[in-house]
Amino acid sequence: MYHSNCGPLYINDLPDKIYSKAQVFADDSKIYRHIKSDMDVKMLQEDVQEVEQWCFNWKLKYNTSKCQTLRIGASITQQNRPIYKLGEECLKNTDEQRDLGVLVDSSIEFEKHINKCIQRAYANWGIIRRTFEKISPDLFILLYKTYVRPHLEFCPQVWSPYKKGRIKKIERVQRVVTRGYSWNDWIEISRKTQEAEAHIT
């Protein structure tokens, strides 16, 4: 969010400047507040203005196009969303936002995030299948753990599904992958290789 030409930038003091809660990671910052009344909307807007002033004091540039508002909760419609301003520009409302690799949506269902994880896992598995016509069990396990499974296990504490349908979709990836090769062919190749090596010795 912030850009500096002066070298390292320390922004740990930003949360102390506002009344709402804030999370800061590297050059990415989030401020959030439980909106229960118009007063909460007003206070959050004041905090956004305070962030703008903080940037001005430190001579930092912010990219308004990358600043968005995400409202989390039930029965959220475009009509009842307040408009917040950063400087003279209105911040765009969004229904989803990627946060440190996790796609967070306004309903906290994480369905789109789960679908994207599954798509990436299948895509990487497709590359492996096209690259290796035959593969040993040891290499299969190594490739699966390196290029497929990490997509299904990244930060599950946040998005771990509780609905059976989504759980089955994730588990299906491993079943599809393990059916991708005929281990009998490899066992036969290994047996012939061992026999040849024994004959040579």
Image: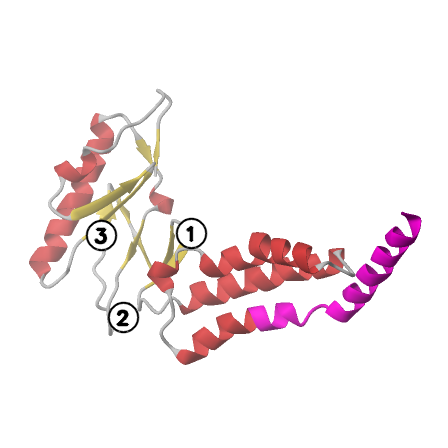
* Percent of width and height locating residue 172: 55, 74
Tell me the element at label 1: loop
- The structure's colour scheme is secondary structure
Q: Residues within 10 Å of mark 3 (few under 14, many from 20)?
A: many
Q: Is residue 187 magenta?
A: yes
Q: Is residue 80 visible?
A: yes
120 or 32, nearer to the observer: 120
The residue at the point 46 percent across, 59 percent down is 153
Q: Nearer the viewer, residue 157 or 41?
A: 157
Segment tinted magenta in the rendering:
174-201
Provide the residue designation for mark 1.
101
Asked whether the viewer can see residue 127, the reply is: no
Task: Residue 154: give its label.
Answer: none
Do the numbered discs 3 and 1 sit on residues whose CB atoms are within 8 Å?
A: no
For residue 77, the mark is 2
Element marked by disc 3 = loop
Residue type at mark 3: give it: Tyr
Q: Where is residue 78, by image quadrant? A: bottom left
In this rendering, position of residue 73 left or right of residue 171: left
Task: Kindly check if marks 2 and 1 are in contact, taking CB atoms under 8 A apart as contact.
Answer: no
Q: Quadrant of the N terminus?
A: top left
Q: Which residue is mark 3?
A: 84
